[in-house]
Image (cartoon, coloured by chain):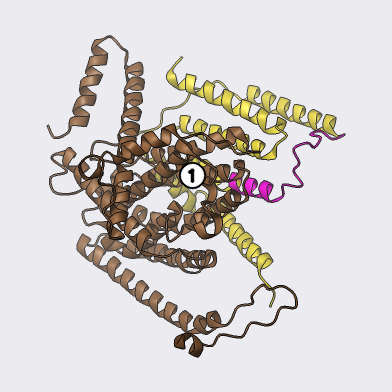
Chain colours: A brown, B yellow
Amino acid sequence: MGDPVTLIAKWLEGLLAGWGLAEGPTAVVMNLIGVIMIVVFVMIMDVFLVWVERKVVARFQDRFGPNRLGPFGLIQPIADVIKMLIKENIYPQGIDRFIYNLAPLFGLFPVLLLWAVIPISPTTIGTDINVAVLYLVACGAFISLGIIMAGWASNNKYALLGAFREVAQMISYEIPMVISLLIPVILARSMELNQIIQSQNIWYIVAAPLAALVFLISSIAELGRAPFDIAEGESELIAGFHIEYTGMKFGMFYAGELLHALTVGGIFSSLFLGGWRGIGAMTYPIVGTFWFFIKAYFIYWVIMWVKYSLPRIRIDQMLNLNWKFFTPLSLVLLMVTAVLDKLLTGVPMLIYFGVMLAANILIGWGTVLILRKTRKKEAPRVAEPKPIARPDGAPPIPAITPATTSQS
Amino acid sequence: MTPLQIIFLLVAAISLGGAVMVVTRQNLVHAALWLILVLFGVAVTFVLLNAGFLAMAQVVIYIGAIAILMIFTIMLTRKVAKDTDEQLNSNWWGAGIISLLLFGGVILMLFQWQNFQFNLPNLNPSVDPLLQLGEGLVSPNAFLLPFEIASVLLVAALIGAIMVARERK
């Protein structure tokens, strides 16, 4: 009891063996069923996520959100899906039809691939590979590929510009993300996600709070969500790479983005918040599923909170934040963690985590000091009037002094 | 045939077909996308050989970085890469002879290699190949020196790229 997934799998295996199926084909059939189960489960959750997202954004903006169809508007996402499916399918002129149709698939399937290695409970995991952490990074490559395909095949300047921006952002933020991913790997001495979770007797967010923060922020940038949504900045690019997509093809990008946000929550909770660990998870694995989704949805909520509270940043701010702040910070964190881990071999766990936390606080304090110093130096430079593009011979623009702005 | 062999044959056929498409497509972006299929086929082959780390590295580096960079380059230089250009120039026969010779040489060498018909060895399940790889890379008895030299080379390339791109003040 308490582990229905394994129970059903065992029963099915026995059933297939009873029908006279050999061991090899049974394994193939069981793996196929497993793949389909994970995909169906995640996709149904994805439909539900549309409702979650709309309800939460409504609350942040002091509205009710969908509340007409069914209790609490729960049937709204199904209506949305039907609307998406029966919308007209528009092919703009001059598109590259095959790639145009292929790109939306790349918007969704890499996110589904991610769920193959995320442990939902101690016993329910798609596949427990020993390079799971690297696998998470590899799936991101396909997402950026899909975006660049969509941008190029649409034959639209805005789409192409949006795709360029998005891919540049994804490639840059991959660096701090991967480096901060290495820190839980060092702490757990394994790249298997289940192994990482099992070694978190104390959550890794205690030992590596800064790495967790860097990972979360660079994951939001990978997602391309606000405040990092310069790729679809409505004021500049209308909608970015998916501007020419209608109906369910747009829906695939949208569903992929929503699901990716929840998936980031799942990955974050597995790496830093102990994944399925919680009260009763070891004896009843199904309770672990509950804990896992509580944590994943909490991080998803944090991502939405950030998205609907912060304004969009500019492209130069995005690049500065990555290359001048996150990349050096994560490199320092990696080196300090590696050295401390080697120095602290054999000490009790509490001391180990305490020293790691103290080191993180020290690094954070130093970072704040450096940031303050930079701010003092940079603030006057940023406040200087910028050159403005004007037609030749136009009269010069009078300089705006701080005094006049405060009066008006 | 085991399921593994069926998968291998499928992957090999797809990779080779993709490779033919890479060199025959006129549209450079299409060629780059076919190349990604070929690279992915190689990654799947690594998986079939129980080399998960190499497969992931293949995807991260070749698809995630190099192929994307290629597509970027092609898109930003679209006027150079016209779809209607002639695909062959007057030296096509030379290239053909060289590639035939190379292919023949490789095949010949493979047939002379005594392990050509070697079956896939079973890995020792108690040893994590990933840990062995990691230890091999930093152990002085194994590959520490080449690994460090490669790292220094990469750092030098990075610094060089920054110097080239830097604004002169």
Foreground residue, A217 or B128?
A: A217
Looking at the rendering, which quadrant does residue B15 occupy?
top right
The x and y percentages for residue A210 are 35, 65
Seen in the image, is A11 located left or right of residue B145?
left
Q: Is residue B3 visible?
A: yes
Within 10 Å of disc 1 (Cα), the crowding (few <14, some 14-19, many 20+) is many
Compared to A40, does A203 lie above or below?
below
Which residue lies at the image location 45% right of the left edge and 27% below the top edge?
B121
Q: Position of residue A74 (x, y in %)?
A: 25, 41
The extreme bottom residue here reads A403
User: Is A225 left, or right, of A212 in this rendering?
Assistant: right
Q: Any magenta on residue B167?
A: no
Q: Is residue B78 magenta?
A: yes
| Residue A146 position (above or below residue A25) | below
Label 1: which residue? A143
> Label 1 sits on what residue type?
Ile
Residue found at x 45% / y 88%: A407
Q: Which residues are magenta?
A: B67-90
